[in-house]
Image: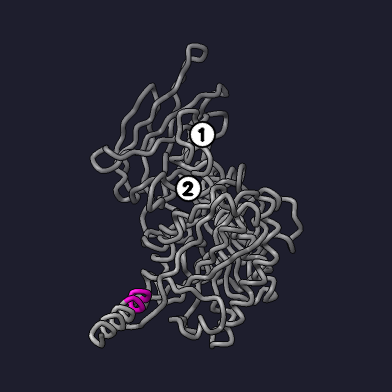
Amino acid sequence: MADHQNKVSLLGRLIVLLCFTRVNGDISQNCSEFQSYSWRSILRRSELNVQFMLLTRRNADCAQFIKGDNDIENSNFNGSLPTKIIMHGFRLTGSKPSWIDDMAKELINAMDVNVVIVDWIIGATALYSSAVDNLDNLGEEIGTLIQSFVSRGSTRESFHLIGVSLGAHLAGYVGRVFDGKLGRITGLDPAGPKFSKKAVDRRLDPGDAVFVEAIHSDSDYFGISQPVGHIDFYLNDGKDQPGCTRSSTSSVYKHVICDHMRAVHLYISSIKNHCPLVAFPCLSYELFISGECVECQYNSLRHCPHIGLLDQAGLHASIQPREVKAFLMTSSHAPFCVKHFLVELMLGEIGTRNQRVEIIFLSNNYNQRSKLQLLITNKRILKKVISHDVSLGNMTAVNIKLLSTWRQKAHVIPIEMLRITELPLNDRETQSRCIYDTVINKVIFQELVNC
């Protein structure tokens, strides 16, 4: 009988132990997971049911649930480290965001930080208007959590809020709880519906943190178009993204949210990869691609802003910028970064007839190429910004072709110089490459030389 009781007691202890998991030598509660949403939850969609999950280098693969002071006290939270808080946005189907684990992982790999994931799936699902209505109360709950962290040694400046879509405006609500004294807010394609015409105190705004940045990738559909931060990055004019399509044969993902989610995947890539995502401050994308904004000296700025984790986006301006638009081109796939080049075409005497010229830049044994079309009018100097995956030093030759139609015959065009220069102009290390004194008559091929 005693032996039987001992076996029962041992079995009980084993069951208790199975209810816990060991994380780097610490005994912690079961790994916290996102809540599951069922259609029964639609009856309580106005409820927040928020939960906070903590990841650190000590428990990088097993999130700890933290809600009250006791949870925080018994967690791996370290008040002497910076804290990144990730906030998702509206969830149509109630599923866990597929990107969230990758973002948390890359943040922890890049820095020794506390990462807090805000799970508000219940309050963010089904009706978009209900999710918007939940932001005030949710912002206060997150503010209470941050205050608990502050009481355990964190400083307000050590907090970095990363909000996706609707979560970007949520970050703004949290920032206002602390009168804009939190360190940083990153808005990833901040939501446009119900916010485009809102006053600044009802959406993300530069006053919500010491430094506010936003990355715009779908400003003509789900994202907001106007600037909402100190620096606003616009990927490919902030609208249609390379690799995304709205054709009738495309997948639902590509058709609906590919552009919107590009800001998220590009930001994760910027943390993971070391190739720079450099942007150019400019009043408009049209001015940028026409070569009018190539030096990154804009008001108090002396450097190009970078997407990623650099302090204040790599800017050390004497005067804090505000609502500065910065544009960059990207590729269609990770790591998304490309190099930007200024193409200048200086022409000899030409007529007034409009003609189109196609210029193809070749590199690496003529295998890689970047294509550009220019409209030749009565201007002697034409400028255009293009992107290319390779450095200028590997750009070896150029193909130039006159484009004609059955309505319009092509005419010979004399070129005094074609010059291509890596940007920014005030921070380049490589020499420009040129061709000189040639005539375009149908098609020409010519090697590039140092200018």
Say what amino acid the circle numbered 1 marks. Arg
Image vertical order of residue 288 relative to residue 212, above or below: above
Say what amino acid the circle numbered 2 marks. Met
Q: Residues within 10 Å of mark 2 (few under 14, many from 20)?
A: many
Residue 63 placement: quadrant: bottom left
Residue on which disc 1 sits: 246
User: Which span of residues is magenta-colored?
Assistant: 15-20
Structural distance between the alpha carbons of marks 1 and 2: 20 Å
Side of 106 relative to 255 (left or right): left
Indicate whether residue 17 is drawn in magenta. yes
| Identity of the residue drawn at 63% across and 63% down | 48
Q: Position of residue 199 (x, y in %)?
A: 76, 58
Q: Position of residue 185 (x, y in %)?
A: 58, 67
Q: Residues within 10 Å of mark 1 (few under 14, many from 20)?
A: some
Residue 132 placement: quadrant: bottom right
Q: How is the image coloured?
A: one colour
Image vertical order of residue 259 relative to residue 61, above or below: above
Q: Position of residue 354 (x, y in %)?
A: 55, 24
Q: Main secondary structure of the magenta part?
A: helix
Q: Position of residue 303 (x, y in %)?
A: 51, 64
Q: Nearer the viewer, residue 366 or 107?
A: 107
Dividing the image into 4 quarters, which one contains the N terminus? bottom left
